[in-house]
Amino acid sequence: MADFSIGVDIGGTNTKFGIVNKDGQIVKQDRLLTNKHEAAQDFIDELHSKLMPMINEAGGLDKFTGIGAGAPNGNYYTGNIEYAANLKWRGIIPFAKMVSEKFGLKVKLTNDANAAAMGEMMYGCAKGMKHFIVITLGTGVGSGIVIDGKIVLGHDGFAGELGHTIIRPGGRLHKGTGIRGVLESYASATGVRETAIELLTENPRIESLLRDYSINDLITSQTVYECATKGDKIANDVFEFTGQILGEALANFVMFSSPEAIILFGGLTNAGDLIMHPTRQAMEANLVQVFRNKVKLLFSDLKEADAAILGASALILDPAK
Amino acid sequence: MADFSIGVDIGGTNTKFGIVNKDGQIVKQDRLLTNKHEAAQDFIDELHSKLMPMINEAGGLDKFTGIGAGAPNGNYYTGNIEYAANLKWRGIIPFAKMVSEKFGLKVKLTNDANAAAMGEMMYGCAKGMKHFIVITLGTGVGSGIVIDGKIVLGHDGFAGELGHTIIRPGGRLHKGTGIRGVLESYASATGVRETAIELLTENPRIESLLRDYSINDLITSQTVYECATKGDKIANDVFEFTGQILGEALANFVMFSSPEAIILFGGLTNAGDLIMHPTRQAMEANLVQVFRNKVKLLFSDLKEADAAILGASALILDPAK
């Protein structure tokens, strides 16, 4: 076994990557902007130019087992990224093949949220669990589902697109897919921003600290969080609303696979109890009795970047996944 | 191995049971009314009094491996029926233990829809499939989910309660659970009846053959079907509405586990294309691109009673399930 592997976590906004040693430690990491490049090849070229000095510093390519990558709509079976709604790269991208050709290393690809779930299972709060779901709340909403200790891939490798499940039929339009009322349109950073703008517009007479920020660019899930902690009513309502919808969706997921835990992961979890409380309440209120007060709802305790990088790197170590 | 096993399928209305031989043939079957008995013990006593003559005719208890039973909220791990919304038996019923004590045979219990899924996998249109979902559309809506060739049980044995997932938040009240807007309140025989009554009441000026039936007892999913085949507008609208909601829910399930097929099973499937067309259309319209035009939506081709009896009887043969 070689000394190192590489984990790459491709998100809608940032791509994080790192060199992982045999003990599961990230010895070196960096990032780049995912959507800076219109073409996947240009992205891979930049990734290569940033990684090669790190690889050489660690002793060169011979010391590396390969590269594991997680990406939206990344398919483990084919190595392709297919029709990812949150990426600029359109159609079917033979990502694993392209990266492998560029680096001369073995490459394994999976859904970015599956990579996070692998990270949680190997190094995070799902250690020892056989049944859990990771929900990533970032630019989009992703999910990695583990049943009987294995990532659920489905018959074609695309299982676990829970961000695209419908929870408000006829509701908000998802610009990437054209489908209305899906979880991602509400429980993502983008969704929180949109909810804030809606509540501000619908309630012109309610004062809000958020009105000091420009709607065009400064109202973000982060500013909504900051205003909420200062007691701002509309900002707090945004998290209540988001948690209600997220909780209902989580109840649906529990009734599918009856997991021991649901682990929330990603930027939105920075809001802490502001998002956790209404989410837990709505989830419990919508579960039938056999599931009530049983399912642990947790925040990931891994550093966000770490879980995904570690999980992605583990792809290359585990021949089964 | 003994010559026979027994399969019992407990539905919200009818319980069907049969003696199954080594070749997977039902050599004898009968039924009883599930909710005739307030107490589970009385139900088991009637089951016993009906089964014993059949057992004796087949050569006596020594010829039998055991009894496999499927029931709403039946739990494979514990052998209990717990808080089943559609049964009169309240709380936690140690069903497998009670039946075993009555018959002196080994008893295995699971969710009724899981039993149907086992039946489809062993004898029906899911033969050879590793990833599929069976949705039972009867008095209630149940589900049996198969991933990698195994029934999904979840960490506590209660996985696969898709009839209780929310698809119209704030919608119809489910009297059994107190939860609003769940699939079962729309896509069951009861739901179809309720939709018909709603549409008749909301559209007093639209003529309908359904107005010839008494709302109190004669409007059923069967009469709605009969009127629809005669071209009745409201009756047809009932199936459009039902299919729309069912299709949206199926899209959600596809995005969870990416199955090769979804198999519809139970009374409502008698409506044929009337329910299949709007369901398929709504499902496809709500799937993100990677899932579109991939998932087979099928009607079970097993006789309804047979699939569940065979599936339940198979529980006792398969030590893993």
Image (cartoon, coloured by chain):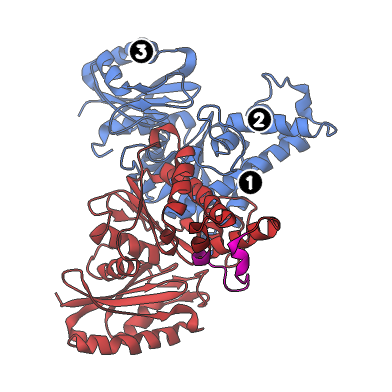
Chain colours: A blue, B red
Q: Are marks 2 and 1 on the same chain?
A: yes
Q: Amino acid at mark 3?
A: Gln
Give the tally of numbered discs. Answer: 3
Q: Are marks 2 and 3 on the same chain?
A: yes
Tell me which label, 2 or 3, sits earlier in the chain: 3
The label number, if any, that marks residue A244 in the structure image: 1
In depth, the one of B117 and A50 nearer the eye is B117
Image quadrant occupied by the C terminus of chain B: bottom left
Question: Residue at 30% across / 85% down in the picture?
Answer: B51
- SS assignment at label 1: helix
Quick check: marks 3 and 1 in contact, CB under 8 Å? no
Image quadrant occupied by the N terminus of chain B: bottom left
Question: Residue at 32% across / 82% down in the picture?
Answer: B100
Question: Residue at 62% across / 73% down in the picture?
Answer: B216
- Residue B221 colored in magenta in the image: yes
* Chain name for mark 2: A
Q: Quadrant location of residue B112?
A: bottom left
Magenta stretch: give its range: B208-223
- SS assignment at label 2: helix
Q: Is residue B182 left or right of residue B104?
A: right
Q: Which residue is mark 2?
A: A194
Looking at the picture, how far across and down is residue A106, in whole percent?
24, 24
Q: Quadrant location of residue A232?
A: top right
Q: Is residue B107 above or below residue A200?
A: below
The residues tagged by marks 2 and 3 sit, at their Cα atoms, a distance apart of 32 Å
Q: Amino acid at mark 1?
A: Gln
- Residue B226 colored in magenta in the image: no
Q: Amino acid at mark 2?
A: Glu
Looking at the picture, how far across and down is residue B262, in whole percent?
37, 50
The residues tagged by marks 2 and 1 sit, at their Cα atoms, a distance apart of 16 Å
Q: Is residue B21 left or right of residue A190?
A: left
